[in-house]
Amino acid sequence: MNNVGILDIGLGNLQSVASALQALEVSHTVMSRPEDVGSSRWIVLPGVANVKHYLAALVETGWDGLLRAQAGQEIRVLGICAGAQVLFDSLEEGGASGLGLIPGQVVRLPGRRPNIGWRLVPGLDDGKGSAKPHFYFNHGYHLVPESQHMKTYTSIGPHGASIVGLLSWEGGVAVQFHPEKSHRYGMRLLRNFLDLV
């Protein structure tokens, strides 16, 4: 049985995510149609894409309806970078409306300068209190959740801007960084998420 499904809508870096899950020896499948969900308990929305095109592909393939109906019910969602951004209500990039699963907006970073590189995300350590967990970011827009009741972990980006690196909500987890490209900290984080399957 495959408990983790990686969304394949013709966009995103699904091969990097698949390689990370393979290295963790996590049973997974690549899914191109909603009917492929089967027994999957987690659905991963990979990053690296224009969000307007990403949303159009979700609608065209029918994934938008399944995610709206089942996130937090039958399945949990792990959205990575652009895959996290499309979960929000509205997106400044392309003036698009998102899936509306997470209340809030995705807006351009201050100074119109992209956040590229390794950033410390305090709190996402190994539980021993001694780690300084750095994760790889590559984005020009960032997550601005409306609810104060969601668990968030923030980083400092360009111009000293506070950036939500990770947030959890009833439907799953959204990460602005790329855990699949973040070496041991990213792999540990993926393992921690997927242990919940």
Image (cartoon, rainbow, N blue to C red):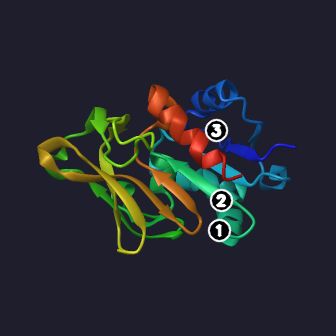
Q: Which of marks 1 and 3 is in front?
A: 1
- Helix, strand or loop status at disc 3: loop
Give the image location of residue 1, x and y in percent: 87, 43
Q: Residue tagged by mark 3? A: 10
Confirm or deny contact between disc 2 and disc 1 (CB under 8 A): yes
Q: Is mark 2 on a helix, strand or loop?
A: strand
The quadrant in which residue 91 appears is bottom left
Mark 1: secondary structure: loop
Look at label 2 and name its amino acid. Arg
Residue beneath the point at 71% across and 68% down: 70
**Label 1 to label 3, Cα distance in Å?**
25 Å
Q: Where is residue 73 in the image (x, y as percent from the top left)?
A: 71, 70
Image-based side of 122 in relation to 20, left or right: left
Residue matched to label 1: 72
**Residue at mark 2:** 76
User: Can residue 46 be seen here?
Assistant: no
- Tell me which corner region of the image, top left, top right, bottom left or bottom right, holds residue 132: top left
Residue at the front extreme? 128
Q: Which amino acid does label 3 sit on?
A: Gly
Q: Residues within 10 Å of mark 2 (few under 14, many from 20)?
A: many
Closer to the camera in the image, 56 or 140: 140
